[in-house]
């Protein structure tokens, strides 16, 4: 099982600042199979990024993904009030899937 | 429009069984990968099981041997059966459509709440 570790657990920032969220795997993860989600309280997770760096339909360009191998990053530039939420990374290998434990982005 | 609607949650005693259903519309259950993802109260997301378009089934270690994923093509419905339920199986269970190539969870239902408690 591939373990994904997200850091930090909580990130406290202000609107307008840039958030950098990390997702690290214990073993190699293909960039093709690395995704990021946003989840707000009481809501279904929303896909932000897939293929490590491809923005999903309708996602603002302030969201960007990067990384390869075992280290991946989600960057949110110019935080908007609606961006404060939980963020999860997710990977797939050999038809098994895992999520990171999440990063809470708070004001 | 692709829609997934879960049903079958409820309060179950430890050691009991459940059967969750996910009614799918807007696409066929045989042409896409479908999966169950759960979220315990106040916790993160946990992948549970997947059935691919060929019918192959895969499970997380936490439910392997206790869970069975299946689909009914006539009803265009996905199922998850679990037995020997534990308190730690308490969660909101989401039915999801998985992208066949990039392997991300593309569409989500609203979830079915399963509470395992005596």
Image: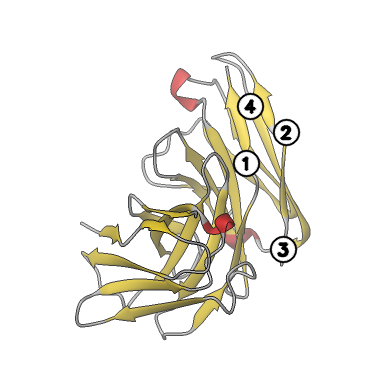
How far apart, in angstroms, are the residues tagged by discs 4 and 2? 11 Å
The mark nearer the N terminus, 4 or 3, is 3
Residue drawn at x 43%, y 47% as measured from the top left = A56
Relative to A84, is B93 above or below?
A: below
Residue B83 vs residue A100: left or right? left
Cα distance between the residues tagged 4 and 3: 25 Å
Name the residue: 39% across, 80% down: B53
Q: Could you give the CA–CA distance between mark 3 and mark 2, rounded to whole angstroms?
A: 19 Å
Q: Is residue B7 left or right of residue A102?
A: left
Check disc 2 and report the residue beneath it: A8
Can you say whether A68 is above or below B55 in the image? above
The kind of secondary structure element at disc 4 is strand
Q: Residue at x 67, y 35 (%)?
A: A21
Are marks 1 and 3 in one subunit?
yes
Q: Tell me which label, 1 or 2, sits earlier in the chain.
A: 2
Q: CA distance from mark 1 to mark 3?
A: 15 Å
């Amino acid at each position: 099982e591939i373990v994904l570790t997200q850091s930090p657990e909580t990130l406290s920032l202000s609107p307008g600042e840039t958030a950098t969220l990390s997702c690290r795997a214990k073993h190699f993860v293909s960039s093709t199979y690395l995704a990021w989600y946003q989840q707000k309280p009481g809501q279904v997770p929303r896909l932000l990024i897939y293929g490590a760096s491809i923005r999903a339909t309708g996602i603002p360009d302030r969201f960007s993904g990067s990384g390869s191998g075992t280290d991946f990053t989600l960057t949110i530039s110019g935080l908007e009030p609606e961006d404060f939420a939980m963020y999860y990374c997710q990977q797939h290998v050999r038809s098994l899937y895992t999520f990171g434990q999440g990063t809470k982005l708070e004001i | 429009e692709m829609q997934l609607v879960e049903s079958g949650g409820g309060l179950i005693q430890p050691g009991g069984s459940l059967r969750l259903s996910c009614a799918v519309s807007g696409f066929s259950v045989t042409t896409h990968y479908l999966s169950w993802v759960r979220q315990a109260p106040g916790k993160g997301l946990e992948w549970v099981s997947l059935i691919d378009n060929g019918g192959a089934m895969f499970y997380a270690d936490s439910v392997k041997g206790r869970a069975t994923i299946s689909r009914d093509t006539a009803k265009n419905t996905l199922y998850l059966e679990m037995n020997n339920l534990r308190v730690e199986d308490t969660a909101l269970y989401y039915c999801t459509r998985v992208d066949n190539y990039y392997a991300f969870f593309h569409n989500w239902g609203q979830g079915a709440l399963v509470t395992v408690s005596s």
